[in-house]
Amino acid sequence: MARGRIFDKIDQLQKFNEELLDLFPSSFNEYSSSKLIKAASERYVEKIVESLIDISFLIARERRLRISEQENDIFKLLVDEKIISESLMDKLKDAKGMRNILAHQYGSVDDEIIFESISEELIDDVNQFIESINLFLHNSM
């Protein structure tokens, strides 16, 4: 069932988030001086955002919601269903934008912006998303 896949994806997302947290340095100098840490962190951002999108689509399919072709619209559906807040939706859209920059190399990547986004926002936003989805799933059973 879709619900089992959703829980599996949540576990995977949580694992990616924890692994990113484990490898992520506390200082920008350490981050910017290590090609390995930067590359691994950027790859985790990509995997995390893909998981956020996958979970959102699985929920939309389970709820039989009309799904747009635009990935950003999937987060709006979760807001409309009162699964996540609008402020979290905005943060997830920003994370998706950051993923697009990393994955497709739109312009040059600003290491300081990536470092701040991960350390100050992404990890907490993912935890908030997981909490919101878990609450929704447990309340809708």
Image: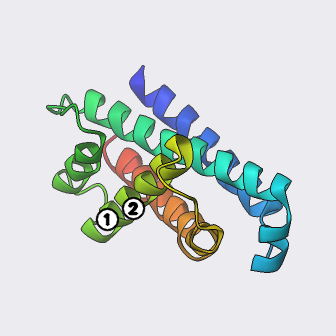
Q: Tell me the mark number nearer the camera, choosing from 1 and 2.
A: 2
**Residue 69, how many percent across, how many down?**
22, 31
As drawn, the residue found furthest toward the front would be 107
Task: Tell me the residue at 82%/59% (across/down).
Answer: 23
Q: Is residue 87 above or below residue 18?
A: below
Element type where label 1 sits in the image: helix
Task: Tell me the residue at 85%/62% (across/down).
Answer: 34
Q: Which mark is residue 17?
A: none
Element type where label 2 sits in the image: helix
Three-letter amino acid code at disc 2?
Asp
To which residue does mark 2 refer?
A: 94
Question: What's the distance in space between the residues labelled 1 and 2, CA to CA?
Answer: 6 Å
To which residue does mark 1 refer?
A: 90
Nearest the viewer among 135 and 18 is: 18
The quarter of the displayed image where residue 111 is located: bottom right
Instruction: From the viewer's perspective, tell me whether residue 21 is left or right of residue 88.
Output: right
Q: Evaluate whether residue 32 shows in this view.
A: yes
